Image: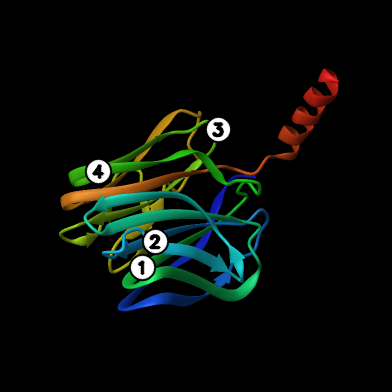
Amino acid sequence: MAIAYTGGTSHYLSVAGTTDTISYTAGSGSNRGMVFFGFTNSISGNVMTSITYAGNSATKVASYNITGNQWMTVWRLENVTSGTNNIVATCSASTDFETHCLEYTDANQTNLSDATPTNNTGSGSVVASITTSTDNCWLVSCGRSTSSGPLAAGSGTTRRNLGSIMSSGDSNGAKTPAGAHSMTWTGTSNCYSLLLALKPALSPTSNTSFLLQYIAQQ
């Protein structure tokens, strides 16, 4: 089965605090995973310390100091709990901050992140590029302009969440073959993006092939 987008949400905590709780109902389907993006603006630095869903902790994959006190972070969560539960984002210092969630089916359940997430900058627009190592990955990213906030979707980009601070979205399709791929955000002035490649779940055929190779080597 191929990766598919099933839903998402975002919330901006405009009054400075350390915790933001967002109710979200996970979709149905197999091999569900979530990608989270966080934005903080604090003199204390990169202060977003955790994101959980239904009490399960997401793993921080990468951080990006886009300018001054402003940071973007990306997180991954596999084996997503079904039903309506809370997303809880926590910071180590009081600040205004924003949290985005994007949910997918048929994502890899061991580690849904393929390759190393990339930081991208541009003026007026930003081309978020990455080199995947697995066939049929999706690209998932957030975008922000320091002068105008959330970016608009450009070439190869479907915006899923329009926040107060940033946008988040994906490639709305698999990237094949593995290699260099990109998605574009557009805005004004200095634009920034943080990009993750979402790795698909192993198909039964892939699992069988791996098992046969393993047995042959014994």
Residue 165 drawn above or below residue 125? below
Whether residue 182 is visible here, answered yes or no, is: yes
Q: Amino acid at mark 1?
A: Glu
Instruction: Determine the secondary structure under disc 4.
Output: strand
Alpha carbon of mark 1 to alpha carbon of mark 4: how far?
Answer: 20 Å
Give the residue pinned by disc 2: 38
C-alpha separation, residue under disc 3 versus residue under disc 2 = 27 Å
In the rendered image, residue 5, in percent from the top left (x then y), is placed at 52, 56
For badge 4, the amino acid type reads: Thr
Q: Mark 1–mark 2 contact, CB under 8 Å?
A: yes
Q: Are marks 4 and 2 in contact (CB under 8 Å)?
A: no
Residue of label 1:
98
| N-terminal-most mark, 1 or 4 | 1
Type of the residue with mark 3: Asp
- Of callouts 3 and 4, which one flags the residue occurring earlier in the amino acid sequence? 4
Q: Earlier in the sequence, mark 1 or mark 2?
A: 2
Q: Nearer the viewer, mark 3 or mark 4?
A: 4
Q: From mark 3 to mark 4, how far is it between C-alphas? A: 26 Å
Q: Which callout, 3 or 2, points at the residue further toward the start of the chain?
A: 2
Q: How many marks?
A: 4
Q: Relative to 70, is 214 above or below?
A: above
Q: Is residue 141 left or right of residue 27?
A: left
Tell me if mark 3 has few (under 14), some (14-19) or many (20+) residues whose alpha carbon lies within 10 angstroms of its own. Answer: some
Give the mark, 1 or 3, whose residue is nearer the N terminus: 1
Residue at point 66%, 68% (across, down): 82
